[in-house]
Image (cartoon, rainbow, N blue to C red):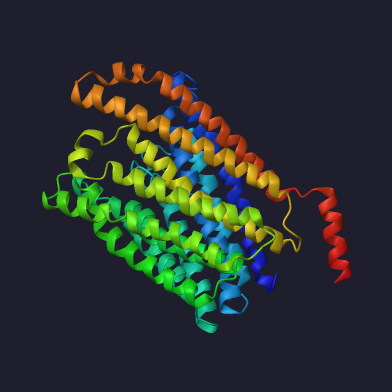
Amino acid sequence: MKYQSQSVAKAYFVAAMALFAVQVLGGLLAGWIYVAPNTLSEILPFNTVRMLHTNSLVVWLLLGFFGAAYFLIPEESEREIHSPMLAYVQLAILLLGTAGVVVTYIFDLFHGHWLLGKEGREFLEQPLWVKLGIAVAAVIFLYNVTMTVLAGKKTAITNVLLLGLWGLVVLFLFAFYNPDNLGLDKQYWWYVIHLWVEGVWELIMASILAFLMLKLTGVDREIVEKWLYVIVGTALFSGILGTGHHYYWIGGPAYWQWIGSIFSSLEVIPFFAMMSFAFIMVWKGRRDHPNKAALLWSLGCATLAFFGAGVWGFLHTLHGVNYYTHGTQITAAHGHLAFFGAYVSLNLAIFTYAFPILKNRDPYNQVLNMGSFWLMAGGMCFMTFVLTFAGTVQTHMQRVLGEDYMSVQDGLALFYWMRFGAGVAVVIGAFLFIYAILVPKRQEIISSDATVAAE
């Protein structure tokens, strides 16, 4: 570890992995409710389980992004973080808000209260006081990282990362705007949801992936930066107007059907560029880096993101297709593989790379770590295929033949059982990953301590 303040990242990574465990367990419970609908229906109904699953996903990904920023910005800027204390204050605010959200959701506290009760917008159900806390934490974070970068060396990686982080925070402000008109509400709601995951989050992903490629492959910085700018340009060009594919059926003007179809089809390009970038960097670098697991996660991230966000997104983005498939299990197939490939795998890659450095040890438990990758990636790919077939059957039975919703759901039971089995593999892989990262083997501790003593 070159800079002492990088140790801040470890606290963020540990908190993120704890929420990662909560998220996958919530997903497994939700998958079980699909096959046994009365499970915990009085104590923990499905809508609450789903909120916990999706909200914990978003929060732990954000914690991972913040931790990655605190880890890589000192190295790129060649100076310590402006204020490590502020970074810990920010983390405390986020964890307090997370705890408040969980308690509010589970016990349905302060129902209907304008400040303390949960709100009804998907992914943005957090009570207003939590949103205000998130905004305060975001301002602290932006001040901290921006002051660090301004006082130090500027690189393409930090410039793109800051652009993505500033965009993330500014777009979150739309979460506070909740108009009475449902069509208008959905239009601005997508400013947060879409322009996060298919806009500024892609910039964050590209910059962190570029940092990993720089460290793992040893390719010249100039080459990495050229690729980075190409990826950023295509991501913004396609992603911003690509928001239109969410405006097809919410009462907006008809021109969004063509704008959304054309530009969202182009969203495949940045993900293909990221996949190509990762593999070409490894081929050009030909560096035998000791952290093989981090390299596997980095390549897996780029590949699965291309298929999940790119290919599976394209499958149902054209408005003529989306007219039939909208809101079916095809959407769930795309969402699961896209989030896992693009952002979950990215965070797990930076965790795998950073933890040995933060603990001043050689990379450890790499076989277990790589095993967790294949378990999670295999489980998620199988889940995606299962949900794709389920969605295809659902579309035909429900949207073409006109059968009623519940009869169709009964016909999909076999697919839901297979989805649950895939979820079990993902959960086992997730806990295997957490163990591999946090618990080194005894002999590895001894050999690492001996190496440090010899140095």
- Residue 79, located in which quarter of the rendered image? bottom right
117 lies above or below 31: below
Residue 433, percent from left and from top: 64, 45
- Count of labels in the image: 0
Q: Left or right of 443: which side holds 423?
A: left
State the residue at coordinates (66%, 63%).
288
Residue 207 at what x, y percent from top left?
48, 66
Q: Position of residue 301 (x, y in %)?
A: 50, 52
Can residue 127 be seen in this snapshot? no
311 and 432: which is toward the camera: 311
Q: Is residue 410 above or below residue 419?
A: above
The residue at 60%/70% (across/down) is 218
Q: Is residue 64 above or below residue 124?
A: below
Q: Quadrant of the C terminus?
A: bottom right
Residue furthest to the left in view is 254
Res. 361 image quadrant: bottom right
Q: Residue at x 32, y 64 (%)?
A: 234
Horizontal arrangement in the rendering, residue 117 relative to residue 240 (left or right): right
Quadrant (top left/top right/bottom left/bottom right) for the N terminus: bottom right
Which residue: 47% across, 30% down? 30
Foreground residue, 447 or 186? Answer: 447
Asked if residue 132 shows in the view, the reply is: yes
Percent of width and height locating residue 271: 39, 56
